[in-house]
Image (cartoon, rainbow, N blue to C red):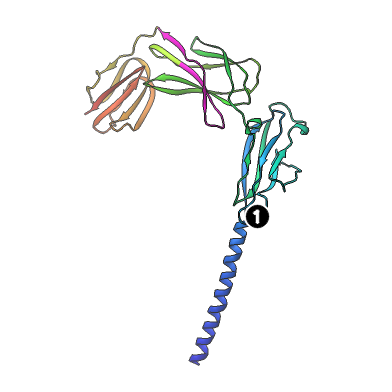
Amino acid sequence: NLTLQTFNFMTFYTELNKHFHILVVLVILLNFNAVAQLNFYGMNKNENLYLVNPRDTISQTFCIDSIILNSKKIDIQLKNSILEVDFVSKNLQDNEVLNLKIFHKRNCKPSMVNPEVFIPKTTFEIADFRYTNDTLRWQTRNEHGSLMFYVEQYRWQNWQTVGEIQGTGSADLQTYTLPVKIHSGVNRFRIKQTDYTNVSRFSDELSYTSTIPEVLFLPVDGAKVSRLLEFSAPTEYEIYDYFGQFIISGFANIVDVSYLPEGTYFLKFDNSIASFTRR
């Protein structure tokens, strides 16, 4: 009886082990054949897009399995190393937003030969740039695709983004406006765009000298504070700890800091940087 039980157990173990290996092989094969997806948003510029279609390193078949444009499958011969995605013949509107999905094997990755015809590229030129009544106004020409305009202001020894507006993408003259807050002294502004190359394009700087009186800080720089920070006028402010970690920001003329642990803090306000010690 003992011999029979041992034999049955070993048979069961052998069969289980064999099926386990089959299962592992199936999982590996399924993983090799699994489909990955690239998702792109762009704008129609009435030019065709070309894709590099490499071979899968495992199956040695071509990488791309299907291409979807705005939820519709594109009828295209996929067994080529270079594919042409035809936008011109599809009766698309100029600057129409396009969603391109490329389904491909996981062991390879397609790429765009000419992404500039699909993905917006920053080419804007500034025709006019001015500040009037708490508002920036700028005009552009030669935009090539809709990209975000970022408005930056130089403050506290850094360029900081103070607003953003989506560009129209039109080559014609376009006008944009954005309300901004100014500080005492010289205010510096610039416009920025960044495209798929991760290279930013900047406008020339605009300088505006404010007649607003300089905001004063009480107590004075480096002094000890028990409960309140007081400014001579409402101002934007930011507070950082001794190690430069951001704590809080706001717009006020009185700030309660009684909740802060004792220690040294750095304070940015108006167009100045100061420090105080919470005791």
Left or right of 65? Residue 202 is: left
- Residue 118 lies, in percent from the top left, at 65, 32
- Which secondary structure, mark 1? loop
Q: Residue 181 appears at what percent x and percent y?
A: 45, 16
Residue at 72%, 39% in the rendered image: 84
Of 116 and 211, nearer the camera is: 116
Local crowd size for mark 1, using a 10 Å CA cut-off: few (<14), some (14–19), many (≥20): few
Q: Residue at x 77, y 31 (%)?
A: 91
Compared with 11, 223 (above or below) is above
Q: Main secondary structure of the magenta part?
A: strand
Q: Is 247 placed above or below 135 here?
A: below
Residue drawn at 70 percent across, 39 percent down: 69
Q: Amino acid at mark 1?
A: Gln
Q: Tell me the quarter of the image containing the C terminus.
A: top left
Q: Which residue is mark 1?
A: 60
Is the residue 137 above or below the residue 18 in the image?
above
Task: Return the residue nearer the eye: 66 or 16.
Answer: 66
Q: Is residue 113 magenta?
A: no
Q: Give percent across and percent down for residue 36.
A: 61, 49
In the image, is 98 to the left or to the right of 7? Answer: right
Q: What is the residue that sits farthest to the top in this orientation? A: 211
Q: Quadrant of residue 58?
A: bottom right
Q: Residue furthest bottom?
A: 1
Question: In the picture, residue 52 is in which quadrant?
Answer: top right
Write the residue at 62% across / 59% down.
30
Q: Position of residue 61 (x, y in %)?
A: 67, 53
- Looking at the rendering, the stretch of residues picked out in magenta corresponds to 189-210
Left or right: where 95 falls relative to 259: right
